[in-house]
Image: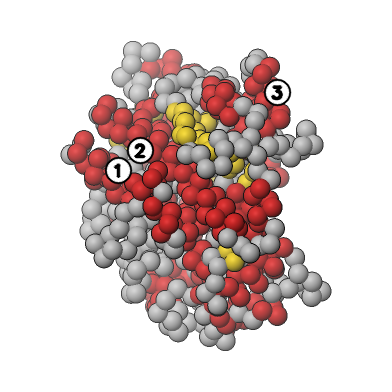
Amino acid sequence: MYLSKSDFQLASSCAKKLVYKKNGYASSNDTDEYMALLAQGGYVVGKMATLLYQDGVEVEGSTTDSLRITKELIEENDTITLFEPAFESNQRLARVDIFKKTGKYIQIIEVKSASRDSSNPNNDSLKLKKYTQDIAYQYTIIKDLFPDCSIECFLLMPDKAIRTNIDGLAGWFRLKEQSIPNESQFEAPEEIITQEKSKFQKPEVEFVFENDPEYYDYIDLLLRESILSYLNVTEQVLGLEAEIRVKADSYIDIINNGLVAGPQDYQISKACKSCEYYVSGDSNCGFFECWKGTSKFPGIFDMYYGGTIGSNNYLNELIQEGKFEFSDIEADRLCKKDGSLGARNLRQLIQLENTINNKEWFSDEMRSELDSWQYPLHFIDFETFTGALSSHIQMRPYELIAFQWSCHTVAYPGAVPVHSEFIYTDAGFPNFIFAEKLMNQIGLTGTPLMWSTHENTVLRTIYYQMKRLNYRNPKLNEWLQKTIKDKEFGTEGRLIDMNAFTLKHYFHPEMKGKTSIKKVLPAIWNNNLFLHQIDYLKKYSISDLENQVLDPYDSLYNLANEAMKSIDDEAEIQSEDVKGGTGAMRAFQRIRYDESISKEYKEELKHRLLEYCKLDTMAMVIIWLYFKQLTSSKT
């Protein structure tokens, strides 16, 4: 059994995870990682990189076949460029993204879809360190196999310092996806590090001009205007080589001989909170093999910023003492070193006291702040896209595109919320019309409300895009300046952050340590049935077969899935979960560029995007309604 590059990455975070992977344990985030790679262009960047090497040969097949083919090609050619060749040495295995050999000179090129900024390299230092470790692992194998060769190592990544002069670059590539059943024996793509056998086949990426008579003209343009740039990391790799070899040997020993529960191999800690091998609802998942003292997810992980308590060590102290329950947290430990209480400590105390007593809490100041919001109230939510490849000229990798907003407006006390919306899925650049439509809808009267700071960030980005692209609309320019919070202006803007408001003024035990809208809404909706009797909210009030109230997001998701199945026989393969940002990005991308799905399916995706964004702003209305009722009943 080999130690692959992805095995090495996983084991570096926790050696026990390597055992779980090799034994085929279920992982909770494989699907999310795969969808993120699709949405942000991970596989597309890989395809673009290969087009920069027109003489390259792709090595395909199983590990056994790839090792054989790679060896034969190198033996037959003194000069050769290979895509994803396989190499093995002393049980270490790696498939190199791009391998270029010219006589006794070798280049190892690792392609990453994540961006870097060559104009400000210090900002990328932590990210680049991780990627350099990846390529250093490959280097140890190549060096052993080619000891007489000079080897250089490069990262090839989208560069935020480069603005493309190719309009519609994202549309030059097309994904051909195929889902694979869970029992598949396909090897997992290395990008999804927790799988041994793949749930997904790595998609084929088409270059749309492959058979175009002007193919080479497009390639020349791609070479001249590439958004990818090289970073030579050979010196850093050499500095890591000894450490990487020692680690690899220890992980191979674990594969061959197993491990023991001890600090020399692994130990449970607060880092386990984010373990991929915790699968909700599965009492036999890998997580509980480590946490033998409990059969449920440790309650101490529910604490708001719990990992920071006691100079970042308190949770580990509790774990070492076998104390996993939320009630095991001691109130007197929730303070700074000097004994004072900061805002975070106060929130932790509120959570601790009210969770143990199973009580809802709201602040004395909540009502007065709510009353300061001026009608009309505009509850807004945006959907945006940030992909490695831009659809528009003069844009950088991962530059923001704002394609959708939803707004529920409450004109006066007691008024029924009025919904308005905007979505743009055509080929043009949507940001300015996006902002203009919103400006025309909410103007400068009343209070615009958002959940978290995303909406302010989007509008701020659009403001600076206007300046950079010389887009002239004085009215929009003035509206943005008065609406957004920006250090350059020295103003707080008009936008109210309901997430920050909730953090400051409200707690319910079912929220645990979270204030995301998808945590706050169920806590309020499930415990206050009077909301379900409001006429315009009745459609969200759905119960399951056991008469349990469903989260409105789950209700809408189930209805949307049924709609998908009625449109397309392949809906179970192609269905998009657009409840989160990644899903929305993916749906937007498919509507724009995916020619493999029907027009009707695209319209349903568009409808689904609109409905979920609409639900986000209605969720804000529901929470606000409850806050108003809660404070008005206070005596």
Rendering coords of residue 60 (x, y %): 30, 43
Q: Quadrant of the N terminus?
A: bottom left
> Any mark on residue 560, and which?
1
Q: Tag on residue 301?
A: none
State the residue position of label 3.
Answer: 478
SS state under label 1: helix
Label drawn at residue 608: 2
Based on the displayed image, in which of its 4 quarters is residue 276 positioned?
bottom left
Identify the residue shown where x is 55% and y is 68%: 360
Colour basis: secondary structure
Decide which of 399, 177 is in the foreground and name it.
399
Residue 484 vs residue 533, the one in the foreground = 533
Question: Which of the two labelled residues, at mark 2 and mark 1, occupies the earlier sequence position?
Answer: 1
Examine the rendering and report whether any part of residue 87 can be seen: no
Nearer the N terminus, badge 3 or badge 1? Answer: 3
**Residue 9 position in % (x across, y down):** 49, 59
Asked if the residues shown at circle 2 and circle 1 are in contact, with their CB atoms under 8 angstroms apart, the answer is yes
Say which quarter of the image contains residue 442: top right
Please say if the residues under marks 3 and 1 sit with CB atoms less than 8 Å apart: no
Q: Secondary structure at mark 2?
A: helix
> Measured along the vertical axis of the image, is residue 389 above or below residue 86?
above
Q: Amino acid at mark 1?
A: Ala
Disc 3 to disc 1, how far (Cα)? 40 Å
At label 3, which amino acid type do we have?
Glu
Amino acid type at circle 2 is Arg
Residue located at (48% from left, 49% from top): 622
For the residues labelled 2 and 3, the Cα–Cα distance comes to 33 Å
* Residue at the extreme bottom: 321
Q: Tag 3, which secondary structure?
A: helix
Figure check: 202 above or below 273: above
Is residue 167 visible in the rendered image? The answer is yes
- Real-space Cα distance between discs 2 and 1? 7 Å
